[in-house]
Image (cartoon, helix red, strand yellow):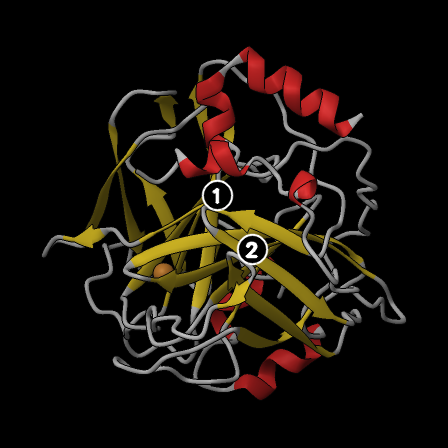
Amino acid sequence: MSRAVALRLGAFAGALALAFGAAFAIGTNVDPIAAAAPEKPAGGMSEMGGGHGEGHSESGGQLPGLAVSDAGYTLAPETTFFTANSKTVLRFQIKGPDGKPVTGYTPTHEKELHLIVVRRDLSGFHHLHPTRDAGGTWSIPFSFTAGGTWRLYADFQPAGHAEPLTLGTDVNVSGLYIPVPLNDPASSYSVHAYDVTLAGTPVAGKESELTFKVSSGGKPVTDLQPYLGAFGHLVSLRSGDLAYLHNHPTQHAEVGMKGGPEIKFGTTFPTAGTYRLFLDFQHAGAVHTAEFTVDVGTDGKTIVPPTALPTETKPHSHEEGAEHK
Ligand SMILES: [Cu+2]
């Protein structure tokens, strides 16, 4: 079934298929997630100190990425209307508690701000680093690959603010829109010349270790390159509301170090549910993204790593090869 859907879509529009590197699957059990569970009990906010508590009531302490405004800061895009497949520039500001664009940031992972762009069906993921002008306007050239409602996340830490913030906003992209069902949970993913496996036992509400293993041509990759101070960056989005989790590996990486084949993360999924995981890693000068659907239960679910990666299960490696020229 999923293959048929994939083929049909693939034939339907090659350009569309390019955008959605992952295999198309149908029938994913997207568990309805009860209202965004507070990350921390409301009463716990006062423990955080650093002045973060006062301005936080807007979002009620919900998970990162769900609010356009939080702790006095607002993600303000120049426009929320775009056209698919036309070159445009994403432009936005982070407005501070005084209403003015923020110009002072504390870099996190070597950047002042990380911009994640993904369509609301969790296809078309991009992790970008826009540039900021002196007045506090961020911009980066971008082309939406298909129509639909897309979500922008800004992940940043204002100077003087105690912790990073992730604000999110939806934007409207006119153009052909064919929603892509989330892939079924799987423990392997192929991107370009790389096969990535995922092992772990994710449990809702407590830290779980996730181990990604990167190989190429059947051989473990042992010279992964540091990318933004780590051998991998993991963004997890909760299906249903697109709550945002950003994780970094337990191992720090500096220029010149070699990593792999394993990249381990300590990840706390806040609730049971289905998550889409996007792992960025760098090898031979290029950054690649491996994507996984993970069902997180309340009592732990083992992601069994495949013993082999038969070629017929490699999802659309030919299409993905064309994605990054
Ligand atoms: Cu980034």
- The quadrant of the picture showing ligand 1 is bottom left
x and y percentages locating residue 161 in the rendered image: 36, 76
Residue 100 drawn above or below residue 91: below
Identify residue type, mark 1: Phe
x and y percentages locating residue 264 in the rendered image: 58, 77
Name the disc covering residue 195, or none.
Answer: 2
- In this view of the protein, which residue sits in the foreground, 268 or 278? 278
Residue picked out by circle 1: 125
Whether residue 201 is visible: yes
Helix, strand, or loop for circle 2? strand
Q: Is residue 246 left or right of residue 39?
A: left
- In this view of the protein, which residue sits in the foreground, 73 or 184? 184
CB of mark 2 near ligand 1 (< 8 Å): no
Identify residue type, mark 2: Asp
x and y percentages locating residue 122 in the rendered image: 59, 40
Which comes before the other along the chain, label 2 or label 1? 1
| Pair 2/1: label in front | 2
x and y percentages locating residue 234 in the rendered image: 52, 64
